[in-house]
Amino acid sequence: RRAEKSRFAAKARRDQEGEEIQALAQQLPFHKETIQHLDKASVLRLATSYLRMKQ
């Protein structure tokens, strides 16, 4: 029972993280087709680079 709650909480957290990373990806200056093929780490890496460039 406890393990089931833990699994559910972890899945909810992963889902929320995925949604937020997708929202971040939509703000990047790339074509939508390109963004759809990026993994989470790539989105974070590109967002970091983009923000550094804008400084």
Image (cartoon, helix red, strand yellow):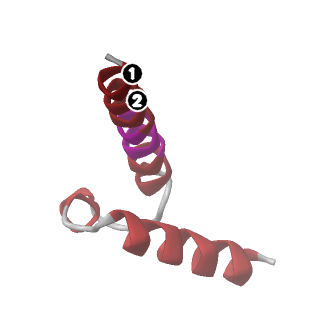
The answer to whether residue 45 is magenta is: no
Farthest residue, direction front? 1
Name which residue type carries label 1: Arg
Q: How far apart in space, not on screen, are marks 2 and 1 (Cα)?
A: 6 Å
| Residue name at image x 38 percent, y 47 percent | 22
**Label 1 secondary element:** helix
**Mark 2 in CB contact with mark 1 (< 8 angstroms):** yes
**Label 2 secondary element:** helix
**Mark closer to the observer (2, 1):** 1
What secondary structure do most residues of the magenta stretch adopt?
helix
Where residue 34 sits, quadrant-wise, is: bottom left
Where residue 11 sits, quadrant-wise, is: top left
Q: Position of residue 50 (x, y in %)?
A: 60, 75
**In the displayed structure image, the side of residue 19 where residue 38 appears, left or right:** left
Question: Which segment is the magenta one?
Answer: 14-20
Q: Position of residue 4 (x, y in %)?
A: 29, 23
**Mark number, residue 20:** none
| Residue name at image x 55 percent, y 69 percent | 47
Residue labelled with disc 2: 6
Residue labelled with disc 1: 2
Name which residue type carries label 2: Ser
* Circle 2 Cα neighbour tier, 10 Å, few/some/many (<14 / 14–19 / ≥20): few
| Residue name at image x 37 percent, y 63 percent | 40
